[in-house]
Amino acid sequence: MIEMKGISKTYRVRRREAGLGNAVRSFFSPAYSEIEALRDVSFTIPDGQIVGYIGPNGAGKSTTIKILCGILRPDGGECRVNGMVPWEERKAYVSRLGVVFGQRSQLWWDVPVGDSFALLKEIYRVPDKLYRENVERLTELLELEGLLTAPARTLSLGQRMRCEIAAALLHSPEVLFLDEPTIGLDAVSKLKVRDFIREENRLRGVTVILTTHDMQDIDALSHRVLLIGKGRLLLDGSIEEIRAMAGENLSTEESVADLYRRFGI
Amino acid sequence: MKKYLSFFRMRLIAGFQYRTAAWAGISTQAVWGLLYVLLYRALYLAAPERLPMEIQALCSYVWVQQAFFSGWNPYAWEGELFSAVQTGTVAYELLRPADLYTMWTARTLALRLSRGALRFPPIILLGLLLPAPYGLRLTIGPAACGAFLLSFLLTLFLCCCLTMLCYGLTFYATDPKGIISIFAALSEFLSGGALPLPFFPPLLRRVAELSPFGSLQNVPLRIFGGDIAGAAILPALALQLFWCVVLAAAGYALLQRGLRRTVIAGG
């Protein structure tokens, strides 16, 4: 169970106008401005749900994920995931968590993927038997056959992303955060990743929070959609409800774009 | 503990992959060693009484230094960790149920060992083949050898502590290049990397010896050559240990504080 109550976060960002003169001025007296990344965000997600977390760029999606991962401390509000406060009991908490940041890599670049997996096994202290089962299952479902012996740098993006997802699940986490897991993938890889997430959720009851700009991901996977814009939670409902709110006969993509416009975000 | 050992093993595996780099390193160190020996030979032939160390001790210094160069040069950084902090990939590291400082220290130590292990045998061999006093000769007794080994290990660990301090500082800078270059220049000079510390003027020598950098290669190399001997060995080792403890504590605190104030930007 994931609970967020009144979470807010403000970033302080250094600013200046372009140009040499301004650069010199800023060197001596930097000006800062405050950006409200999250304002009073609250939601509750029961176990086993797949939640699509959507919103335009800069809406606060990644900030929310970072807070839920325990790597960012909010300025205010309460947050509990399976009874734990993410940023307070970091070590105990993260061992029950699987995370994929679509734009970053957790595999060692120059060594075979299998070695990266073996390292993760030790870091998370996965028992031998469970590790073997998981690798076997993930290899089959994500079609990793032949990829584990290749260095990560030699893999295509789609192949690597499948390995990244497998890497996040080696320790059988209860909660999975996927931050743009299908970014840059071709159609075949996207479908494989989606099928896998659906199966993993159905068979093992993993709770999934998925951020994405790909509305087909949302269509294919989410039981529920959270829409965030300018740091505020604007909508909480099913895809059908979102479609219903937008005009007739619109695709999910168009419905969402319509909502973005309507909320002025 | 086991997870840090596997981190160590992983880095070792990764390190052994770079064969061309190892060959390049070996030839660089061989040529560099020969140049130094030629330089000291010229000094020795011109005015032997002006040399602050025995010529044999000096040449052994050069060969052992070059042999283990990649193991204990204080600026053997892992670019990947700097960029992890700069680009935010460090987020993944924070998601591990492990202590970041220990994890990265294990990694740093393994990087040095893997680089060093591949490169030292040919240089040692070259040193042994050269005629005395220009080659590598073991002139010290078994007790001093023991002290050399201990001092060697302390140097290795102290190098890692200093490297960790640099990684820690990265959390406070937009780009670590400035910190790194200052650090590299200081450490090279004050650790006796460019010139053994006995060549320094007395005051500067004292400062260098007492600084953390003076507890790096300076100590084991001079124990090996017999320049630090007898009663002088124990205080030198104690100072090394002292800096290890202080810098490890400082690095740990710096990293923890850096992590707390860090904001991983972008999606």
Image (cartoon, coloured by chain):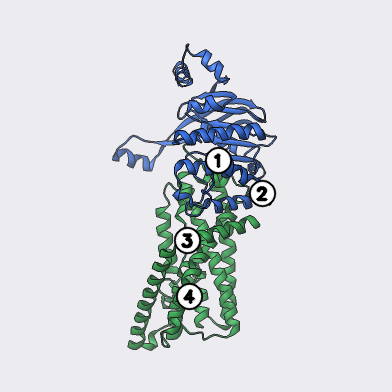
Chain colours: A blue, B green
Report helix, strand or loop for mark 3: loop
Q: Nearer the viewer, mark 4 or mark 1?
A: 1
The residue indicated by pointer 3 is B17
Tell me where residue A235 appears, x and y as whole percent.
55, 20
Disc 1/disc 2 C-alpha distance (Å): 20 Å
Compare residues B134 and A218 and report the one nearer the observer: A218
State the residue position of label 4. B121
Same chain letter for marks 4 and 1: no
Q: Tell me how far mark 4 sits from mark 3, CA to CA.
A: 18 Å
**Residue A38 point in image, percent of width and height:** 53, 28
Residue A126: numbered disc: 2
Q: Which chain carries label 2?
A: A
From mark 3 to mark 2, how far is it between C-alphas?
Answer: 27 Å
The answer to whether the residue labelled 3 contacts the one labelled 1, judged by CB atoms less than 8 Å apart, is: no
Q: In which quarter of the image is residue B135?
A: bottom left
Q: Residue B142 falls in which quadrant of the image?
A: bottom right
**Amino acid identity at mark 4:** Pro
